[in-house]
Amino acid sequence: MGALQELKDYVREISELYSAIALCAWDQRTHMPEKGAEARSKVLGRLERLAFERVVSDRMGELLAAAERDGAPTEVDQALLRVWKRDYTRNRAVPPDLYQQFVEATSRAETVWEKAKATSDFALFRPHLAEVVSLVREIAELVGYKESPYDALVDEYEPGMTTAALRVLLGSLRRELVAFLKELSRGTPPHELPAGMFPLDAQRQLCREALGWIGYDFAGGRLDDTVHPFTIEVGTGDVRVTNRYQEDDPFPGLFGALHEGGHALYGQGVDPQLAWTGLAGGASFGIHESQSRFWENQIGRSRAFWRYSHPHLIRHFPALARTKPDAIWRHVNRAQPSLIRVEADEVTYNLHICLRFELEVDLIEGRLTVDELPARWNQAMVDYLGVTPPDDAHGVLQDVHWSGGMFGYFPSYTLGNLYGAQITETAEREIPRFWGKVQAGELAPIREWLRENVHRHGRVYLPDELVRRVTGSGLSAEPFLRYVRTKYSEVYGL
Amino acid sequence: MGALQELKDYVREISELYSAIALCAWDQRTHMPEKGAEARSKVLGRLERLAFERVVSDRMGELLAAAERDGAPTEVDQALLRVWKRDYTRNRAVPPDLYQQFVEATSRAETVWEKAKATSDFALFRPHLAEVVSLVREIAELVGYKESPYDALVDEYEPGMTTAALRVLLGSLRRELVAFLKELSRGTPPHELPAGMFPLDAQRQLCREALGWIGYDFAGGRLDDTVHPFTIEVGTGDVRVTNRYQEDDPFPGLFGALHEGGHALYGQGVDPQLAWTGLAGGASFGIHESQSRFWENQIGRSRAFWRYSHPHLIRHFPALARTKPDAIWRHVNRAQPSLIRVEADEVTYNLHICLRFELEVDLIEGRLTVDELPARWNQAMVDYLGVTPPDDAHGVLQDVHWSGGMFGYFPSYTLGNLYGAQITETAEREIPRFWGKVQAGELAPIREWLRENVHRHGRVYLPDELVRRVTGSGLSAEPFLRYVRTKYSEVYGL
């Protein structure tokens, strides 16, 4: 047996362990009885350890070296070598003791963060965050980078992306969005919809139908309730969506389903040949997010979509029977500066991310201390969004990410929006009568186009390669800016 | 670290793998989308292999030997050594090649059995069954035994039980039951209940309530639908029940829930200290079955239970509003010789088992060939139950067990009935106003008594030790015979 085949057998075992981990995690967040929590955390810890031991094992190092010597004959084999070597190298760079320190520090920090957020007490969180930042900086040095230690972090989520490139992209995006927000404030906001109660079962049913419209395959997945929605790839043919609902508003549930459904279509569209190779995931967090944002925003918040789906909406919710499709479309495209990222609209959302990116880079590059963080945060909120957090709970303490040491993750959200808009422009050109199809509910050709161009490749291409293959050029903020300006100018009557 | 502690750490890892396996299996049979089946079988195979490798590893052998040399200080430690040594020894006795042959032969045989049963074609199944029997006999020789090769098989399911002891127990049971059936045929069968439709959601709700009555803790478990009901211990604090329902008859669902609930109470009642030791299961298949049969039959088919539960039944099913509690009690205690084991009542069920036991022993001891099996089966059905199978699908082909090589399993069902009746007689003596409590729906003291005497011990005691501790004497068929004679004589007006 050749070295490459041995490597494939070895990563198959790891991938099968990941599948078991995914199922345990899914169950933990959807069906597990509360008293099962302690046992589950032990089982998850064990499976993760068994997988991790293999990812960083001497045997993995030998197999990678041998397979590299032999050479990888195909594009897929080369990608397989690339992704496992990356995981091996990143993880071997960090000594087990330091990693253990990191795990313990973030575990403590997350616990303290919950309390600090509840009481809006940044001073409580500060020493823990400082410890996490210090460890993350140490890890970044060990992982290595070309220009900025932040490169080492962002690369984990968006392989190949650099701090310098993000500065350019997000810098111009921020300037344009801040200016556009000022314009919007002179426009006319959409009318309010009539208030009502929207029974959860009807919402679930509508979401099942909406997942059907976009082509989610229930024979290869499920829809379940959860507290913090997520999509999870348990295995080939088993990509599960979870969602939550608000009884006084049917739209968060519906857009949640379209968002998670977009992630799930990616998972369901990967070439089955890539199963158990480590290549069956998404090209990056940003590319994955582009697929969720595509269905949630580009399609789900389009006028054409509401012309199609409005009768279905009012069938489930008679309280909305007197609304018109365009009123719904306007309603779901409201832009309003606000304090909380996860509640933000398409225009302001990316400003929340730009702010976090800039603070993260300064923290990791050592130009900003944790002590200075709240003041910098609040100033940036005023500068970018024109709002002032009344306290740190509604400011610097709002997100869990930093307590978990996830520096470099936030940009993925905005990258998803940018990739999504850029891919949409290409799809509009390449798919005849794109918006006519959306308005007729004929979404299959659009999904097939995405499958052919994006989904089936899994992790074979790096994000930059993939976006060039799909759209013909590297990532740019322009398509997103065009999209946002056009739609919101119309909604706000500019 | 002492050898015993090292052994405990090692079996903890195996037990954690078993927990992941249990969750994968539960999901496979309750929630998994159909297209996830192939990936799931790979993941289950991998986890089982990882666990099995550890059970039979050289390291396990060394740890067991070292721990035995050091000596096990407590009863629990001794039991831990006993159960892992047993698994190690049994599995090491069978060479991997032979085991592989067995796995493949049974896999083929199960596939062929399905087809053979569907077409009632024993000739199709015969060569496969012959191969399985031959391999099972070979395995029994390697595992070793004192008197009969069947000892080696039955010991897997009922540690310490022997063929000789079963011959005595089941022989007298069979003679008494055959005689009692003749008596019953002169009695008056219960009246039919009015026909009706019983909505599945109402059945599910009643079953949830019934599980609540017997003290099943939903904070440490769940109730889900499935095709072939089972109970599964995912981990400490996570013992899940599954069930199925018939729309034209509410009783199979209700008794299914009580049966599975009985298994689940055992799992929920095990001392949490036994978690991850391999001792958190039941003492044997027979003892486990005694707990399900206790709640299903001893309690669930008692007159007292129906006096309590009748108002709840008619609340859910107005179609039964004109029935009386005693009519329900009589209805659920109908005895009627029939062809199919899984549809049999309390009187005739054990005769189906006696028949299988006798044929199994003769096959394994080499006194019966597979060719002769259908004729022997049909003759025994006439002798014991007075019915003649019209074809092999309703005869020798009805059960899956033999195709899977599970010789020695069938007696567990009857042992469960016998243990259950014997434990009930003790409980009636020791718990004041036993049946008064049942009639008042005060089942908590009964469950607590079982927890204290049976459940909390897990696998610490061998079945024979356990039943002596609980009831003061070894297993006997007499309590069961007294129970069946008393109840059915009354129902049939003898």
Image (cartoon, coloured by chain):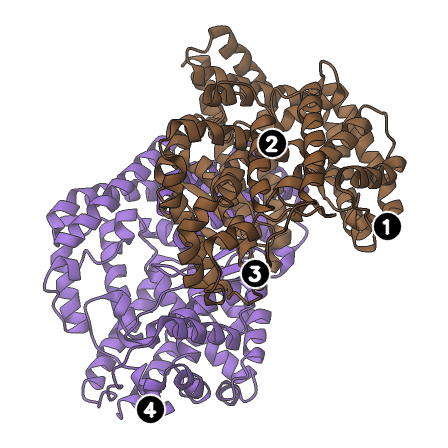
Chain colours: A brown, B purple
Q: Is residue A106 above or below residue B277?
A: above
- Residue that badge 3 annotates: A193
How would you rate the neighbour count of disc 2 (Cα within 10 Å): few for under 14, some for 14-19, many for 20 or more?
A: some
Residue of label 4: B323
Q: Nearer the viewer, mark 3 or mark 1?
A: 3
User: In whole angstroms, how far apart are the C-alphas of marks 1 and 4?
Assistant: 65 Å
Q: Position of residue A446 (x, y in %)?
A: 39, 35
| Of the pair B72 and A82, the residue shown nearer to us | A82
Q: Is residue A231 above or below residue A170?
A: below
Residue A166 locus on image (x, y percent): 68, 24
Q: Which residue is mark 1?
A: A121
Q: Residue at x 74, y 19 (%)?
A: A142
Indicate the secondary structure of the residue bearing disc 3: loop
Residue at the spot of label 2 = A481
Front label number (1 vs 4) = 1
Q: Nearer the viewer, residue A465 or B4?
A: A465
Label 1: how many Cα within 10 Å (few below 14, some 14–19, many 20+) = some
Q: Amino acid at mark 3?
A: Leu
Q: CA distance from mark 3 to mark 1?
A: 37 Å
Q: Nearer the viewer, mark 4 or mark 2?
A: 2
Instruction: State yes or no: discs 4 and 3 in contact (Cβ < 8 Å).
Output: no
Kind of residue indicated by mark 4: Thr
